[in-house]
Amino acid sequence: MSKSKKSELQRSFKAVGLKGEELSFSDPERAFLAVLQQAVGSKFYVLGKVKVLDVFSFENEDKLYPRMVAKALANTRFDYLICDKETSEIVCVVELEEVLQQKYMQQKWLRFLGWLVQKFCTETSLARLIVQQQRGYLLDQLIDRFEAVTSQFSASLS
C-alpha cells in the first residue's frame, strides 16, 4: 500500500485479489480493449471495470471525509487497469472518455468524480491515461501515450 499524508489515502500496489467485470463492457469498450491489449504488449495484462475503492482506501475510514468520498465513489469503476505480468503491480489506469449528451448536473458530477480520481492517482503516484472514445485507434499513438505516462510516473518513484 502506498500512503498519502494529506488525506490518509492508501493505494494497493498489487492487482492480486482485484476482480474486474469484463462482462459489463459496452461494444466500444470491448473494441478498445482489443487495441489496448496490443498496445501494452506481452509484459502486461489488462483488468477491466475494477472498482475505484478496491484500489484506493483510507486509513481512518470512520472519519467524515473518507465516508463522503466512499459514498461518492461507491459505483465508480476504472475502465481498465494495466498490470505487470510478473509482479502483478498496477502500472497504469486507463479511462475511455465517452462523448455523451448529458444534463448539466450529470456533467458536473462526472467532472467532480474525474477530478477526485485524478487527485487520488496523483497523490499515490498511479499513472492515469485518458483516451477519447472514437471509431478507430492508432496503435502506435496509443503505445506512445502509454509509454509516456508510465515512464513519467516510474521516474517520479525513483
Image (cartoon, rainbow, N blue to C red):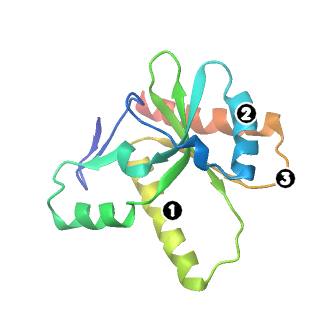
Instruction: Please tell me whether mark 3 sits on a helix, a strand or a loop.
Output: loop
Please report contact status of discs 2 and 1: CB closer than 8 Å, yes or no: no
Q: Quadrant of the C terminus?
A: top left
The percent position of residue 80, horizontal first and vertical second, equals 57, 42
Q: Residue at x 85, y 47 (%)?
A: 136
Q: Residues within 10 Å of mark 1 (few under 14, many from 20)?
A: some
Q: Nearer the viewer, residue 79 or 129?
A: 79
Q: Residue at x 76, y 36 (%)?
A: 35
- CA separation, marks 3 and 2? 17 Å
Q: Nearer the viewer, residue 84 or 53?
A: 53
Amino acid, disc 1: Gly
Tell which tag, 3 or 1, sits nearer the viewer. 3
Amino acid, disc 3: Arg
Which residue is label 2 attached to? 143
- CA separation, marks 2 and 1? 23 Å
Left or right, 63 with reference to 19 = left
- CA separation, marks 3 and 1? 23 Å
Q: Residues within 10 Å of mark 3 (few under 14, many from 20)?
A: few
Which residue sits furthest front? Answer: 23
Instruction: Please tell me whether mark 2 sits on a helix, a strand or a loop.
Output: helix
Which residue is label 1 attached to? 114
Amino acid, disc 2: Ile
Of label 3 and label 1, which has the lower sequence position?
Answer: 1
Which residue is label 3 attached to? 135
Of label 3 and label 2, which has the lower sequence position?
Answer: 3
Q: Residue at x 36, y 50 (%)?
A: 53
Q: Residues within 10 Å of mark 2 (few under 14, many from 20)?
A: some
The percent position of residue 16, horizontal first and vertical second, equals 39, 27
Which residue sits furthest top? Answer: 86
The percent position of residue 95, horizontal first and vertical second, equals 60, 50
